[in-house]
């Protein structure tokens, strides 16, 4: 799909896999976790709000596989603490790849 033109540049996207809805809003929009391919680049995890037809979206965040793995490890690591007071330790680090700015949609304005 073509989302919009931004400075005479089309933003193309394809939702490769819909993983789930994180939350829903009274407007019909939903915050979703999907795997999305932006501008014919590598498919990545994507968290953002979408309209019901998936034609318009808010700004969001894309994550490489390793980045998503790091987040899952962090969340799972803190879920064992019943009081919710888990703290990150300086030794808890997760290696993630350098961002690919050329295909990073955060550096482009998302249509609204």
Image: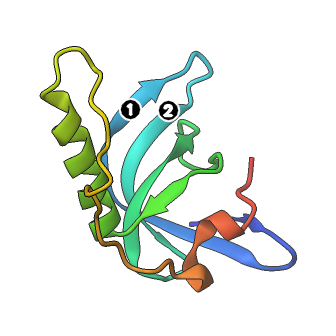
The residue wearing badge 2 is 30
For the point 36% across and 69% down, which residue is it? 64
- Give the percent coordinates (x, y) of residue 73: 20, 50
105 or 71, nearer to the observer = 71
- Give the distance between the C-alpha atoms of the residues marked 1 and 2, in whole angstroms: 7 Å
Q: Is residue 1 visible?
A: yes
61 or 89, nearer to the observer = 89
Q: Report if the CB atoms under discs 1 and 2 are less than 8 Å apart.
A: yes
Occupied quadrant, residue 95:
bottom left
The residue wearing badge 1 is 22
From the viewer's perspective, is residue 85 above or below residue 58? above
From the viewer's perspective, is residue 79 above or below residue 110? above
Residue 46 is left or right of residue 17, and the answer is right
Query: How is the rendered protein coloured?
Result: rainbow
- Give the percent coordinates (x, y) of residue 110: 70, 57
Task: Tell me which label, 1 or 2, sits earlier in the chain.
Answer: 1
Label 1 element class: strand
For the point 43% across and 26% down, which residue is it? 23
2 or 95, nearer to the observer = 95
- Give the percent coordinates (x, y) of residue 104: 57, 73
Where, quadrant-wise, is the N terminus in this rendering? bottom right
For the point 29% across and 61% down, which residue is it? 93
From the viewer's perspective, is residue 19 above or below residue 24? below
- Give the percent coordinates (x, y) of residue 22: 38, 32
Q: Is residue 2 visible?
A: no
Residue 35 is left or right of residue 99, and the answer is left
Other residues around mark 1 within 10 Å, as few (<14) / some (14–19) / many (≥20): few
The disc label shown at residue 111, or none: none
């Amino acid at each position: 799909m073509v989302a919009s033109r931004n400075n005479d540049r089309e933003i193309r996207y394809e939702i490769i896999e819909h993983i789930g809805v994180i939350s829903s809003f009274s407007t019909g929009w939903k915050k979703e976790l999907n795997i999305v391919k932006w501008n014919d680049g590598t498919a990545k995890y994507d968290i953002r709000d979408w309209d019901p037809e998936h034609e318009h979206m808010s700004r969001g965040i894309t994550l490489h596989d390793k980045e998503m793995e790091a987040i899952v490890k962090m969340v799972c690591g803190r879920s064992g603490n019943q009081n919710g007071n888990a703290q990150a330790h300086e030794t808890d680090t997760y290696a993630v790849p350098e961002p690919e700015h050329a295909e990073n949609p955060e550096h482009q304005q998302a249509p609204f």
